[in-house]
Image (spheres, grey):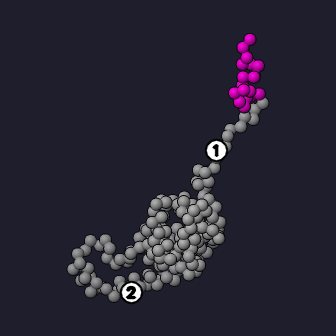
């Protein structure tokens, strides 16, 4: 069994959503900025999560994603299985005959191992992950990350606070020093 980066990122993104959602949807762009995951990749993940019934989407201004169920009713296994196809022999490079011989010798060991991993992942709820994040001091609001706020906020204009310094072209022309006699 392999838990891919895709599954790990999905768990992180859904945890971020669960920590920060209040009663309104969270935009994927804010999750993207907070976690450093590309927006297009998050769109793929959340599409799979929506098809699995774990999240709901809202379109339009103020739209985004919310959890479809309470965090205590979503397990880590649910999230991983929604976005990943778990495989025992993915990427082994062995031919089918070698895989069958290995399975016949130690198949029960690996089947039991995979069952234990899945059992553990099913025992960890999204609520458990949310509580871990809150214990670390992660804010529970859905405030925009600093990078997004900086990008959207207008740049402050420099102010001329010194006395005698013109604040416009007209004031500059009215200054006695620059007038020709």
Left or right of 103: which side holds 12? right
Taking depth in this image into account, of 34 and 112 the one nearest to the observer is 34
Horizontal arrangement in the rendering, residue 145 relative to residue 38 (left or right) = right
Residue 156 vs 17, above or below: the answer is above
The quadrant in which the N terminus is found is bottom left
Considering the whole magenta stretch, tell me its main secondary structure.
loop
In this rendering, does residue 128 appear at all?
no
Residue 5's image quarter? bottom left
Crowd class of label 1 (few under 14; some 14 to 19; many from 20; radius 10 Å) = few
Left or right: 158 in relation to 77: right
The residue positioned 72% from the left and 26% from the top of the image is 170
Residue 40 at x, y percent in the picture: 46, 60
Relative horizontal placement of residue 98, taking residue 65 as reference (left or right): left
Q: Residue furthest left?
A: 97
Q: Is residue 152 magenta?
A: no
Residue sitting nearer the eye, 160 or 54: 54
The quadrant the C terminus occupies is top right
Q: Residue furthest top?
A: 181
Q: Where is residue 64 drawn, in percent x and y?
A: 56, 65
- Decide which of tag 2 and tag 1 comes sooner along the chain: 2
Name the residue: 60% across, 61% down.
Answer: 61
Q: How far separated are the C-alphas under marks 2 and 1?
A: 59 Å
Label annotation for residue 155: 1
Say which residue appears at 41% left-offset and 70% top-offset.
4
**Mark 2 = which residue?**
112
Identify the element where label 1 is drawn.
Answer: loop
What span is in magenta? 164-181
Compared with 136, 107 (above or below) is below
Which x, y percent locates residue 27? 57, 63
């Amino acid at each position: 069994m392999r838990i891919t980066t895709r599954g790990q990122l999905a768990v992180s993104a859904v945890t971020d959503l669960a920590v920060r959602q209040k009663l309104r949807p969270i935009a994927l762009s804010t999750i993207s900025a907070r976690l450093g995951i590309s927006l297009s990749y998050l769109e793929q993940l959340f599409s799979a999560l929506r098809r699995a019934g774990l999240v709901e989407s809202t379109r339009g201004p103020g739209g985004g994603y919310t959890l479809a169920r309470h965090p205590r009713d979503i397990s880590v296994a649910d999230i991983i299985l929604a976005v990943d196809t778990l495989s025992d022999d993915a990427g082994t490079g062995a031919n089918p005959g070698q895989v069958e011989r290995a399975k016949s010798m130690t198949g029960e060991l690996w089947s039991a191992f995979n069952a234990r991993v899945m059992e553990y992942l099913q025992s960890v709820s999204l609520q458990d992950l949310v509580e871990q994040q809150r214990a670390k001091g992660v804010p529970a609001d859905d405030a925009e990350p600093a990078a997004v706020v900086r990008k959207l906020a207008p740049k402050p204009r420099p102010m001329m606070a010194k006395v005698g310094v013109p604040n416009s072209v007209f004031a500059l022309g009215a200054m006695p020093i620059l007038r020709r006699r």
